[in-house]
Amino acid sequence: MTESKEKTNGSISDEIDAANEKAVERVNKGKAVLVDFAPAKKVIPGMRDDLILHAGPPIEYKDMIPAMKVAVQGVLILEDKAKNLEEADKLAASGEIEFKPNHEFSSAAPMGGITSASMYVAVVENETFGNKAFCNLHEGRGKILRFGGYSDEIIERLRWMNDVLGPSLAKAVKKNPIDLKVITSKALAMGDEFHQRFIASSLLFLKEILNPLLDTEAGVKGVNFIAEREQFFLNLSMPAAKALIDPADGIDYSTVVTRLTRNGVGYGIGVSGLKGEWFVGPAEIPKGLYFPGYSEDDAEHDFGDSAITETIGLGGYASAAAPAVTRFVGGTVKDANQMTMDGYKVSVGESRDFLIPNLNFRGTPLGIDIIKVNQTGLVPKSNTGIGGKVPGVGQVGAGISRAPIEAFRDALRAYAKKYGL
Amino acid sequence: MIEGKLKVFAVGAEWFYQEMDKQDIKLYKIDWAPPVELPKDISNILKGLGKN
Amino acid sequence: MTVIYHEVKGRYIDSVLLMQITRELEQKNGVEEAAVMSATSQNLEIFESIGFNPPKNVESSSILIAVNADNETIATNTIKEALDMLDRKTESSDIENYALDDLESLTEEGDFPLLYISTPGKYVEDIAKKGLNQGVNLHIFSSNVPIETELELKKIAHEKNLLVLGPDAGTTIIQGQGIGFANVIREGTIGIVGSSGTGIQELTVLLDKGGLGISAALGVGTNDFTREVNAIMTKQGIELLHDSSMIIVVAKKPDATVMKEVVKILSKKPSAFVALGDADTYTEGETYVTGYLDDAINFALEKAGKEPLAIPEAKMDFDLQGRKFVRGMFVGGSLCYQAQAILKKNGIDIYSNAPLDENHQVDRNWDDLDACIDTGAEEYVQGRPHPMIDPRLRNEMILDECRKDDVAVVLFDVMLGYGSARDPLDGLENIPEGPVLVASITGTTNDPQDYAKVEKGLKKLGVKVFTSAQQAAEFAAKVLEEK
């Protein structure tokens, strides 16, 4: 008996639905456990001495925004590959250093996202599927490397983080692995949305790590370091999201978005059924409120891997759980709810573990569908920090950034080509 | 005369909605957004999927 | 330059709200720099980096307001406003959103449902049909709807005994409620049907000023009196309001044949028809036909046993000194049109961007011409709010005319009511001396703006204020006789 392999457009719809359901199921089934901290080269497969990872879609050093360039230069100094910024700049531009997106190395990091070989990174394991994801350590706010800050103070702090804090956290966490997904679920009911607001989750994490960390070299200083940083959980939330979304990547026919990330120049997306391909549109300046003394003239375009949070149904899609964040753009409770409701319109399913109390504990929208985004024009939106153009200035405000519709159009075109539509 | 209980559904400009809201009118705001304008090839792909 | 600091103790306010307050303060006139933040040591550094020198003894848990303004009055007022904003309670919104498909389920027995459409014209057809299919009357404010679409909608509506008020309809008043641009009018028994929005507004306020009231006012849209549309909705409206004591119809440049038919329908009962732009005045049956709004009102007043509209005395206390031109700057299109008709009747060769005839078209340059400009016309409202909503552009144009040394009289209209700006005189401060200033206020004492305050404000600027637009235009013509 011969099997008819003719695919009508009707049945391709079924293939897509089945593939997407599988993708959402994989995210829901996943676990995200913080198991270790270690130098990048030791734990990130493929990491090398002459490789630097960055946020966003692929970009060459010469095209990077100033804040990212200075972060690269600072990191080269930290790696003892250059003595000063000028030397570092020359080295970076020389071609001897390779630059790749974090996403291509199972990583995700905020703002500049610069990750190098000897930098300590968090290791998050998805125990359901066995995959791991990584992210550098959270520096804090204000004058820091990830915003392009460079000074003796910054370098000194980074050295301490690498020499003392990293190994101490490793010791603490190896004795007591921490379930990040549980913290996320709890904190969602406490007003965190996991793109801009991490107050509750950072405190919950501190609670878990406090005693184990006291019993290490970092000790009280380490505990204080974490306590002072209101967004410490940002650098744990991102690898947790990466660990959860990666098993949903590479499912044939699936139209679910598995990457959302920016580098200040381009905003790139990735699609499960188009594994490894990047679709890039222009990164915009987020619309929002500026801190006193700053205005849009000081603002850099959207950068960072933090939009990974929207791929697992958090961030902008969880706004209904965190109306305080939407106020950043003069928004109201209604606007916050609207961002979540718009999410349902473009998503395949709902999260089983991330629930919104105000919506009768409905799960957040999960599985952004490029088809629905094309149909409705409702691109993913994030509540995000606005970085300063001038390297080192840090955060100048907060606002809403949108993914470019062009990236979704291109993704759909590529999808149609690959699957013969 | 116009008989019946006046009930107004407003779609479009926020200004007029606000002005009518200040009066004694039973007023409903209608959610509406302009239909999305799609490039031709995208429109074709979506049609092919039966999702236009 | 005045800098003031104010410490607020014992309050915790979200930093986001403080940022919003800072932003609002900075946008005020005369404020150089402002910042409202909690007085932590980190934030005090930020105050310094912006140029402030905050007091050292502020508690770190306090909120510090810092204002740098042009003078002490502004600075003090700004601090006061900041304190008000800190106490401001946000309104919780109970309003739910509905979709276009919900209209039928939301309409109950005994309702008069009306869908108010103010989207761009190209989307109107779909939305309108959805409304009509669910048994809902329409008021369409939107313009740029093809006339074929208008005809189709009105035919469908007529079959279902529903109203389509518009497209391009500015004003409707039903049961005392204002739909679109509308004044608050005494309740009464006179019905108004019109294809001209500001014409309707002027009729309603003049009735009110004369002591009468309305049953309803229906705006049927600027194209109802074209040959194609053939006044379908006007006729339906007249029928609907048949138990009014009198019906007044107003139309701008109506097609002669269509008008004739409507007058015939009206002629069986006491009524009036105002055909703006037409010079003829006559009676047909019980219908008084005229080209001027006041004349129709006075007809109604007389029928009701009331005095005609009072005309304020205006002194001819000016010396034109060689000035010779009249410039009208209007927000109401119909009032602009009526003014032209009145000026023309008085022998003035009047031009306009919305002229009485195509030989008197003017665009952007009216030097050496007598001109009346409709600032609500298409070319002026591209990407801007309508001048009734934001009259600052029109008011700036008034100032421009006053700066010219050959302009004898500047004529304008001030529109009150719902939909119109709460401060219609915004931008009219410091009118340069020169031309005679003549205006009318289309409004009532119950409108949300303060009529008395507006009148006083105009008089203070040296403007001669009249009860009606017709009176104002007639006075402007009289002024020109003195040149």
Image: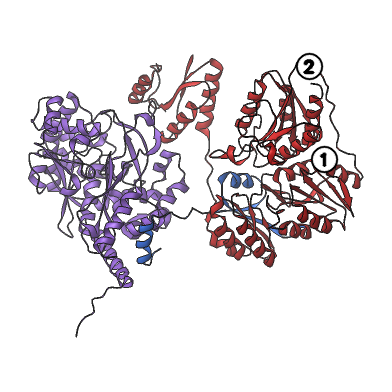
* Residue A333 percent coordinates (x, y): 46, 46
Which chain hosts label 1?
C
Image-based side of A91 in relation to A394, left or right: left
Q: Residue at x 23, y 58 (%)?
A: A274
Name the mark on residue B15.
none
Left or right: residue C251 versus residue A178 is: right
Residue C3 in the image, given as x and y percentages of width and height: 47, 16
Q: Can you give x and y, in whole percent of width and height, for residue B25 in the image?
A: 66, 51
Q: Residue at x 41, y 63 (%)?
A: B52
Colour chain A is painted in:
purple
Given residues C36 and C349, the one toward you in this image is: C349
In the image, what residue type sits under mark 1? Asp
Q: Residue at x 33, y 72 (%)?
A: A10
Rendered colour, chain C: red
Tag 1 secondary structure = helix
Quadrant occupied by the C terminus of chain C: top right
Instruction: Reply above or below: C280 against C87.
Output: below
Mark 2 residue type: Asp
Q: Nearer the viewer, residue A106 or A415?
A: A415
